[in-house]
Amino acid sequence: MTTPRCVVGLTGGTGVGKSTVADLLVAKNAVLVDCDQLGRDVVAAGGSALPEIFDRFGPSVRTDDGSLDRGALASIVFNDEAALADLNGITHPAIDTLIRSAIARAPADSVVVLDMAVLVETELGAGQYDVVVVVEAETECRLDRLEERGMDREDAKARMASQATDDERRAVADHVLVNNGSLDELSAAVDRLWDDLRAE
């Protein structure tokens, strides 16, 4: 089994540019683990979490072809904290297993980046990363970016309000990247971060 030099938990709220930071780190040969994608994998056809989800939530979340009806499931858990906790209790251990496998497959001496939107809000990935990198940006900057992507500004505000606050993220951060400016400025900040990560 190989041992990465460093495993990074990368997080930040919607619109801060977290995916751009992930891409910049990959360009430096970091190994990216997209935890959102792993979340989709465990509930896809044949996914390890699917049978237990059907057992817990019943036939209303199962389509005719045996796949997950995501809309039906979302309507159940959206306003029911207990149901959401049950869903996370099923999916997060399955995702954690895939994260462990991805880390184990990473080349020795590599920097592994766990791109994880809900690092602060949940226990997903807990104990598997060595350092936490938080990307943040001013609210208006985030809203402008999300609007440019086609998201309604009020919807964007509601999504941001449902996530962890900047203070909550900073409380667990080892490194904070502020992304209020240009891509060149962000790239320079990632260059400095990379040097720090290689020295961890």
Image (spheres, helix red, strand yellow):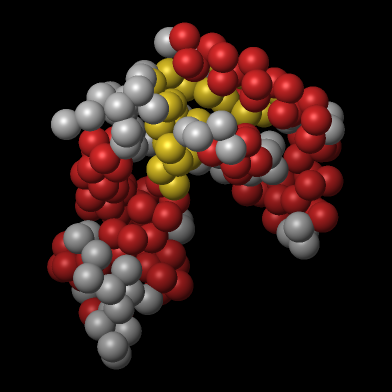
Q: How many marks?
A: 0
| x, y percent for residue 52 | 17, 62
- Residue lying furthest bottom: 64
Out of 175 and 117, give the one closest to the viewer.
175
Q: Residue at x 29, y 90 (%)?
A: 64
Q: Quadrant of residue 99?
A: top left
Q: Is residue 21 above or below residue 195?
A: below
Q: Residue at x 40, y 31 (%)?
A: 112
**The C terminus lies in quadrant:** top left
Q: Residue at x 32, y 36 (%)?
A: 106
Q: Residue at x 30, y 78 (%)?
A: 67
Q: Is residue 66 something one can see in this rendering?
A: yes
Q: Quadrant of residue 31?
A: top left
| x, y percent for residue 158 | 66, 48
Q: Quadrant of residue 164?
A: top right
Out of 111 and 53, give the one closest to the viewer.
111
| x, y percent for residue 56 | 19, 64
Q: Is residue 149 above or below residue 134?
A: below
Q: Is residue 191 left or right of residue 163?
A: right
**The N terminus lies in quadrant:** top left
Out of 160 and 125, give the one closest to the viewer.
125
Q: Is residue 131 left or right of residue 98?
A: right
| x, y percent for residue 4 | 32, 25
Q: Is residue 79 left or right of residue 84?
A: right
Q: Is residue 154 above or below residue 56?
A: above
Q: Is residue 160 something one can see in this rendering?
A: no
